[in-house]
Image (cartoon, grey):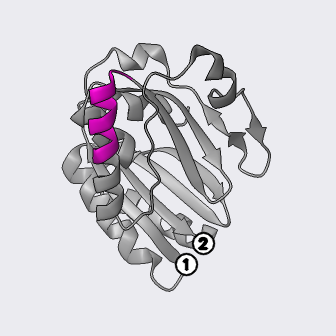
């Protein structure tokens, strides 16, 4: 989500699909003018590097229309993740501007840690839980929303609770998330 936000705020690109893979990771497929795709790719690499997350980014200039069947994944559902593995952004969300609220993410390895983190976050600030996503390998992400200050306080408090209960993978606040982030949030 953080990478999608950085890409959309840097250049005129839109998410075509987000496809979960087994590592845990996500393959983001974008469309837009070539120069914007290249700028968005650089933003993705810089953002991932700053977060200490590996990323593989590749641009295919002018893909053949015949290759669409290979890169556009069909709908799929994983009982292990308890969610679709291919996410399609809602087109209506892509037409909207940035949102007036913030989104916070707390990702851990271990259920106990994520439950303690989110309980602490909710007791710290006036935030709302949007979703809990299982990513495989014991990785779980909880997504919250609220105003920027409340989400930041909640994420900071939640991060502090993870120590000793599990492993903190990532914690991040996205102020005014981009349309692509909003369209990919779990429903």
Query: How far from the left and from the top, in percent, is residue 6?
Result: 29, 42
Q: Quadrant of residue 61?
A: top left
Between residues 80 and 100, which one lies in front from this camera angle? Answer: 80
Residue 36 is a magenta residue: yes
Residue corresponding to mark 1: 166
Query: How far from the left and from the top, in percent, is residue 26?
Result: 55, 47
Between residues 67 and 147, which one lies in front from this camera angle? Answer: 67
Q: Quadrant of the C terminus?
A: top right
* Label 1 SS: loop
Please indicate whether residue 114 sits to the left or right of residue 106 in the image.
right
Distance from disc 1 to disc 2, alpha carbons, whole Å, reads 7 Å
Q: Can you say whether 44 is above or below 72 in the image?
A: below
Q: Quadrant of residue 102?
A: top left
Q: Can you say whether 147 is above or below 37 in the image?
A: below
Q: Residue at x 71, y 50 (%)?
A: 81
Please tell me whether the stretch drawn in magenta is mainly helix, strand or loop: helix
| Residue bounds of the magenta highlight | 32-43
Q: Quadrant of residue 5?
A: top left
Query: How far from the left and from the top, in percent, is residue 144?
Result: 41, 47
**Image mark for residue 112:** 2
Q: Can you say whether 130 is above or below 108 in the image?
A: above
Label 2 CA crowd tier, 10 Å (few <14, some 14–19, many 20+) = few
* Label 2 SS: helix
The earlier-in-sequence mark between 1 and 2 is: 2
Q: Quadrant of the N terminus?
A: top left
Please indicate whether residue 176 sits to the left or right of residue 134 in the image.
left
Answer yes or no: do the residues labelled 1 and 2 have beta carbons within 8 Å? yes
Query: How far from the left and from the top, in percent, is residue 17?
Result: 54, 30
Q: Residue at x 62, y 30 (%)?
A: 71
């Amino acid at each position: 989500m953080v990478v999608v936000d950085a890409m959309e705020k840097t250049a005129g690109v839109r998410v075509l699909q987000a496809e979960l893979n087994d590592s845990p990771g996500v393959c983001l497929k974008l469309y837009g003018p070539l120069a914007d795709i290249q700028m968005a790719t650089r933003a993705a690499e810089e953002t991932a590097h700053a977060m200490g997350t590996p990323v593989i980014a590749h641009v295919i200039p002018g893909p053949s229309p015949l290759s669409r069947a290979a890169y556009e994944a069909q709908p799929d559902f994983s009982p292990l993740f308890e969610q679709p593995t291919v996410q399609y952004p809602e087109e209506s969300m892509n037409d909207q501007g940035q949102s007036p609220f913030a989104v916070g993410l707390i990702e851990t390895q271990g259920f106990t840690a994520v439950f303690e983190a989110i309980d602490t976050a909710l007791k710290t600030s006036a935030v709302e839980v949007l979703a809990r996503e299982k990513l495989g390998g014991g990785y779980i992400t909880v997504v919250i929303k609220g105003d920027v200050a409340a989400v930041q306080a909640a994420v900071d408090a939640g991060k502090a609770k993870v120590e000793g209960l599990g492993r903190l993978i990532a914690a991040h606040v996205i102020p005014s998330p981009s349309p692509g982030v909003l369209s990919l949030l779990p429903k």
